[in-house]
Image (cartoon, grey):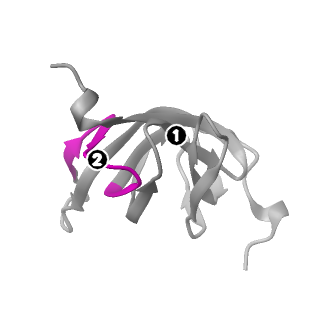
Amino acid sequence: MTSEEDLSKVVPFLLAILVCDASTVEPSSGKKTLVGIFDRVLADNFPTNRQCALYFKITDAQGKYIFKIEYAQVNTGTKLAEATSNVVSIKDRLKAADFILGFPPLSVPAPGQYEFRLYANNMYLGRATIIAEKRSEVKT
């Protein structure tokens, strides 16, 4: 069990954060493949659910980290879901590290803006946003 004192105080630098439909990791090389990167959800009706994964890449990290992602509805401030990683050890501050976190279908209660907020040891790193829209109201 890792205590709060064992976690790194070094704030990682967020290089990328992307929302996608699905992802895979090649076992031999560790290469990640992201399928269907998106920033909009179109639905005929709300509420709806959406399967997704979150990819993020950091650098300038060293030590032990617990990553947390909060999924929230921006206009109401309502936190709809949260996911927390196991303890991750990063040894070399000069190398980048990337991660994928898959989610069960997430609720999209209404049209509007939603955020995936990324934290490392409760230090805010950044966010990815998506916009939910009613399909019939989207102008092409």
| Residue drawn at x 27%, y 38% as measured from the top left | 38
> The magenta stretch spans which residues?
33-52
123 relative position to 31: left or right: right
Residue closest to the eye, 133 or 31: 133
Q: Which amino acid, by three-letter code, is at mark 1?
A: Glu
Distance from disc 1 to disc 2, alpha carbons, whole Å, reads 13 Å
Q: Main secondary structure of the magenta part?
A: strand
Residue closest to the eye, 75 or 126: 75
Is mark 1 in CB contact (under 8 Å) with mark 2?
no
Report crowding for label 1: few under 14, some 14 to 19, many 20 or more residues within 10 A (C-alpha).
many
At which x and y percent is residue 73? Answer: 56, 43
Magenta residue check for 44: yes
Nearest to the eye among marks 1 and 2: give it. 1
Secondary structure under tag 1 reads: strand
Residue 28 in sight? yes
Report crowding for label 2: few under 14, some 14 to 19, many 20 or more residues within 10 A (C-alpha).
some
126 relative position to 22: left or right: right
| Residue drawn at x 60%, y 39% as measured from the top left | 12
Q: Which residue is mark 2?
A: 20
Question: What label does residue 101 carry, if any?
Answer: none
